[in-house]
Image (cartoon, grey):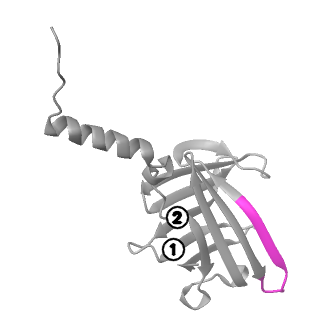
Amino acid sequence: MKRTLTATPLAISLAAILFVGAATPAAVFQRKSPFDGTWIANISKSKRHPNHLFKSAALTFTVSDGIVTLSYRGVNMSGAEEKGITTFHPDGKEHPLEGLPGGLEVSRWLTPRILKTVATKDGKVIGQSTFEVSGDGKTLTANLSGTDASGAKFEQVIVCDRE
């Protein structure tokens, strides 16, 4: 007995979807975070603390494999360049802060456009930040507060434009 395979419209549709899916690079299916990219501080829209003034700042966010990397660079009011990297683990668990013995970071996504972080040292909150990307993806607002190295409390809002 000879069997004949009949291609139904559903079978053809499924084959087409599987073929297109196999031919499309995996990167197309990876959802890019609204944070990814470089953001330039808009000083005129920001509310900076007098002890934390700067001439310019740029923040670069990279979100990959459940980790948020924030690279920053800028020029302080003395004209000196500053730069660094901070890593956030937005899983709601405590993670050690590099370069700060006894320091811990707890970060979590409040929404896909809002990242909240809290830094503690020896059980006391030393800093909090909320980073929020606007609905149109053009603006990032960083609300920062804490206690600086001199022991002074500060609050500031840094508004950044996407580069």
Q: Nearer the viewer, residue 131 or 68?
A: 68
Return the residue found at the far top. Answer: 1
Q: Which residue is mark 1?
A: 140
The disc label shown at residue 13, or none: none
Residue 12 % position (x, y): 22, 39
Q: Which of pointers 1 and 2 lies earlier in the amino acid sequence?
A: 2
Do the residues bearing badges 1 and 2 touch, measured as CB atoms within 8 Å?
Answer: yes
Q: Is residue 141 visible?
A: yes
From the image, give the main secondary structure of the stretch colored magenta.
strand
Side of 136 where 93 appears, left or right? right
Q: Is residue 149 visible?
A: no
Look at 64% across and 73% down and name the residue there: 154
Look at 67% across and 76% down and name the residue there: 58
Quadrant the N terminus occupies: top left
Return the residue found at the far front. Answer: 2
State the separation of the CA atoms marked 1 and 2.
8 Å
The part of the image, by quadrant, that contains residue 78 is bottom right
Q: Nearer the viewer, residue 24 or 95?
A: 24
Residue 161 % position (x, y): 54, 80
Answer whether residue 84 is magenta in the image: yes
The relative height of residue 9 versus residue 132 in the rendered view (above or below) is above
Q: Nearer the viewer, residue 52 or 59?
A: 59
The relative height of residue 99 versus residue 21 in the rendered view (above or below) is below
Residue 43 % position (x, y): 61, 88
Residue 44 % position (x, y): 58, 91
What residue range appears in magenta?
76-85
Indicate the amino acid at tag 2: Phe
SS category of the residue bearing label 1: strand
SS category of the residue bearing label 2: loop
Q: Which residue is mark 2?
A: 35
The part of the image, by quadrant, that contains residue 146 is bottom right
Instruction: Specify few, some or many for label 2: CA neighbours under 10 Å numbering under 14, 14-19, or 20 or more.
Output: many
